[in-house]
Amino acid sequence: MSKSPPARTGPVARLLFTCALVAGCGDPGLVADEPGRTVPAELPAPLEGSTVRLHRESTRCGRAATGPTIAELGSGIEFSIHETKALAAPCADSPMPESEVDVDGPSIIFDFSNVRGPGVFPNSEFEGYVLHFTRRCGDPALESATVDLTVSTVELRSADLQTHYDRLRVNLAGVRYDSKALFKIDLSWRRLRCLTGQPAGQD
């Protein structure tokens, strides 16, 4: 799959520039290749060229995740407002805001600056998005995720995030948004060795 990504503009570009000037917006992207030892990583560089799938999910109406829309990891915005808007709504009244999702290095940025009006994600056990990374044997595994509260403008906390090897679940139940809404999620990855004959995602 090839992608001609649009250039980063607006709040996402300003946020990335700010992160470069200050203390890096937190200290994400540390991976462990043996107990007690961490090394900084240029991630998801090891995943460069692989794909990530974005789903919209809700537990309110008994439906599984809808979608997905698929993007290749690389430079530029992975999921445009048109792609996130085109995701199938899991419930008839599920909000589908015009947000951009940018997987940039060890972080993910959700930018709502193009939404047409304010809204709120309904209260539910889970109401939000799921990102599923395609891992090849030897690729790092997603270990943890935290909300960068220094730049995020919505009521989202790290407890609202769930990680499991190759996927991230972002629970936005009860979260309000408008055109000023933006949140940044910092990812930590664990370096894994590839065992001969072992399928991707199982190392």
Image: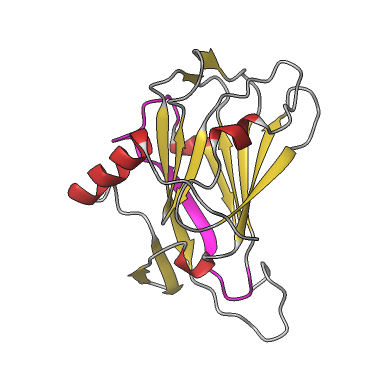
Identify which residue is drawn at 46% across, 27% down. Answer: 112
Q: Position of residue 43 (x, y in %)?
A: 43, 62
Q: Nearer the viewer, residue 38 or 168?
A: 168
Residue for point 49% across, 69% down? 46
Q: How is the image coloured?
A: secondary structure
* Quarter occupied by residue 170: top right
Residue 40 or 143: which is nearer the viewer? 40
In the picture provided, is 98 more to the left or to the right than 188? right
**Residue visible at 28% across and 35% down in the picture:** 150
Question: Is 125 situated above or below 13?
Answer: above
Asked if residue 203 is positioned above or below residue 91 in the image, the reply reads: below
Q: Position of residue 65 (x, y in %)?
A: 74, 38
- Residue 118 lies in the magenta stretch: no
Q: Quadrant of the C terminus?
A: bottom right
Q: How many marks?
A: 0
The residue positioned 64% from the left and 83% from the top of the image is 195
Q: Do we see residue 159 in this rendering? A: yes
Residue 187 percent across, percent down from the top left: 44, 52
Taken as a whole, is the magenta stretch helix, strand or loop? loop
Can residue 23 be seen here? The reply is no
**Quadrant containing the N terminus in the rendered view:** bottom right
From this viewpoint, which residue is outermost toward the bottom? 196
Q: Position of residue 132 (x, y in %)?
A: 64, 51
Toward which corner of the image does residue 149 lie, by quadrant? top left
Q: Which one is nearer the viewer's eye here, 146 or 131? A: 131
Q: Which residues are magenta?
A: 136-156
Residue nearer the viewer, 78 or 65: 78
Q: Looking at this rendering, what residue extends furthest in the right direction?
A: 62
**Relative side of 169 to 46, left or right:** right
